[in-house]
Image (cartoon, rainbow, N blue to C red):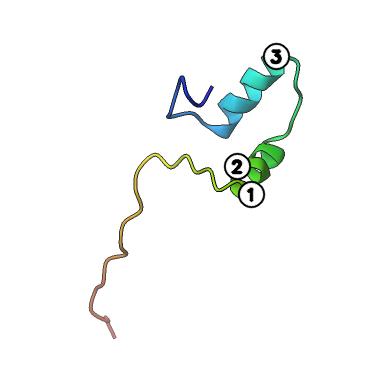
């Protein structure tokens, strides 16, 4: 599923697995991807902006 659609959510992955007869929770999917270092961010992280103190 990840190869077919690079922009997929955990809920979509879960529903695809349910369609195949595999019942897992979203937390289980999150831990699976987290432990393997697989990220599915929609946009790259950017540096936080630095603003002057207001006080």
Q: Residue at x 46, y 19 (%)?
A: 4
Q: Secondary structure at mark 1?
A: helix
The N terminus sits in image quarter: top right
Mark 3: give few (<14), some (14-19) or many (20+) Cα within 10 Å. Answer: few
Residue bearing mark 1 = 35
25 horizontally vs 51: left or right? right
Q: Nearer the viewer, residue 19 or 33?
A: 33
Q: Is residue 40 above or below residue 13?
A: below
Residue bearing mark 2 = 33
Residue bearing mark 3 = 20
Q: Quadrant of residue 46?
A: bottom left
Q: Residue at x 43, y 29 (%)?
A: 7
Q: Which mark is residue 2?
A: none
Can you name the residue that lies furthest to the bottom here? 55
Q: Earlier in the sequence, mark 2 or mark 3?
A: 3
Q: Please say if the residues under marks 2 and 1 sit with CB atoms less than 8 Å apart.
A: yes
Mark 1: give few (<14), some (14-19) or many (20+) Cα within 10 Å. Answer: few
The C terminus sits in image quarter: bottom left
Mark 2: give few (<14), some (14-19) or many (20+) Cα within 10 Å. Answer: few
Q: CA distance from mark 2 to mark 1?
A: 6 Å
């Amino acid at each position: 599923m990840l190869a077919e659609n690079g922009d997929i959510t955990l809920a979509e992955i879960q529903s695809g697995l349910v369609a195949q007869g595999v019942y897992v929770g979203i937390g289980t999917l999150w831990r699976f991807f987290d432990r393997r270092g697989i990220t599915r961010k929609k946009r790259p992280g950017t540096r936080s902006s630095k603003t002057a103190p207001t006080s």
